[in-house]
Image: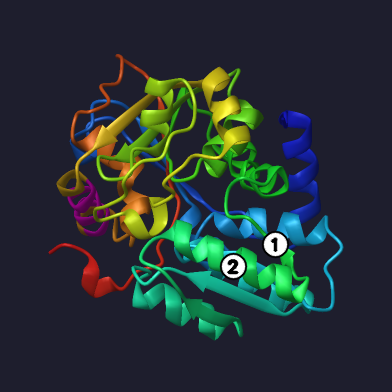
Amino acid sequence: MIDRRDVEAAWARIKSHVRRTPVIDVPAGALGISCPLAIKLEQLQVSGSFKGRGAFHKLLSSAVPASGVIAASGGNHGAAVAYAARALGHKAEIFVPTIASPAKVARLKSYGAVVNQVGAVYAEARAASETRAAETGALVVHAYEDPGVFAGAGSVALEFAEQSPVDTLLIAVGGGGLIAGCAAAVGKGTKIIAVETEGTPTLHEARKAGKPVQVAISGVAADALGASLIGTPNFEIASRLVVDSLLVTDDAVRGAQKILWDALRMVAEPAGATALAALLSGVYTPASGERIGVLICGANTELASIPQ
């Protein structure tokens, strides 16, 4: 179990390797939302998503063997591990499922990683990566169930709080690493709300069952939010510190992508627009005067894929 001190230590370790991404303030009434809104542009992070924070922390805090690192990913985590490995002089081998977007696969290759597309979903790619790691002895960098990874990811919440304090923080959830890290960092002072798509309800179903459970994965955000089982340490943190878990439709996510582009000229992949979709679709209704923070967590997509 990690806490704020772990996240602060991770942030100090990675600061010179990652970007301090900007926050823009959107006044009440803009975008059709009744409350003031702060949007953190983590899609501008190294490798195109918040994942760069966790990848750098894991590699900087671990003994990396000559065989390098191995990761399984829907695309964003793999890109982050490949980017960090190249920056730090390590080999990287990344396993992604066949549903990974071409844009994400191209980015992985551009960072010099060996890329293997295996299995229809993330869980199958992960199994293949673990078999390969046993053969090579490479360091496994898990996408979301490693405290070292999600302590690094949680640094985004500390940075956000410095730049623009909010009452409530809406965070998209896949395997739960980002929300676990953010909740550990600021959860006792900020209301944390999880947002998932109806096709990727991993945390939502775990909260109903009282424990992590397998879920079927589908829909527009499946390549990034497609973990079929939330991480156990992540769920323990979320159970204590996350106030609610909300579901949005694929259409709401596409709508949020479109509004981000039309109104603000921001590119976001579906996962990156999922948290905002909860506000725009009315799934989350803010209280009068409530200041909301939204994390745009990634933009590893093609501009042509943004709904017009």
Q: What range of the chain is rendered magenta?
A: 253-261
Check disc 2 and give the amino acid type. Answer: Ser
Residue 111 is inside the magenta segment: no
Frontmost residue, 81 versus 22? 81
**Which x, y percent locates residue 113?**
60, 81
Vertical placement of residue 2 versus 287, above or below = below
Q: Which residue does the numbered mark 2 point to in the structure image?
A: 129
Q: Which residue does the numbered mark 1 point to in the structure image?
A: 140
**Which x, y percent locates residue 206?**
43, 29
Check disc 1 and give the amino acid type. Answer: Val
**Which x, y percent locates residue 248?**
24, 37
Query: Closer to the N terminus: mark 2 or mark 1?
Result: 2
Distance from the alpha carbon under mark 2 to that under mark 1: 8 Å
- 2 and 1 marks in contact (CB < 8 Å): yes
| Quarter where residue 18 is shown | bottom right
Residue found 74% across the figure and 55% down from its top = 57
For the C terminus, the image quarter is bottom left
Vertical placement of residue 286 versus 174, above or below = above
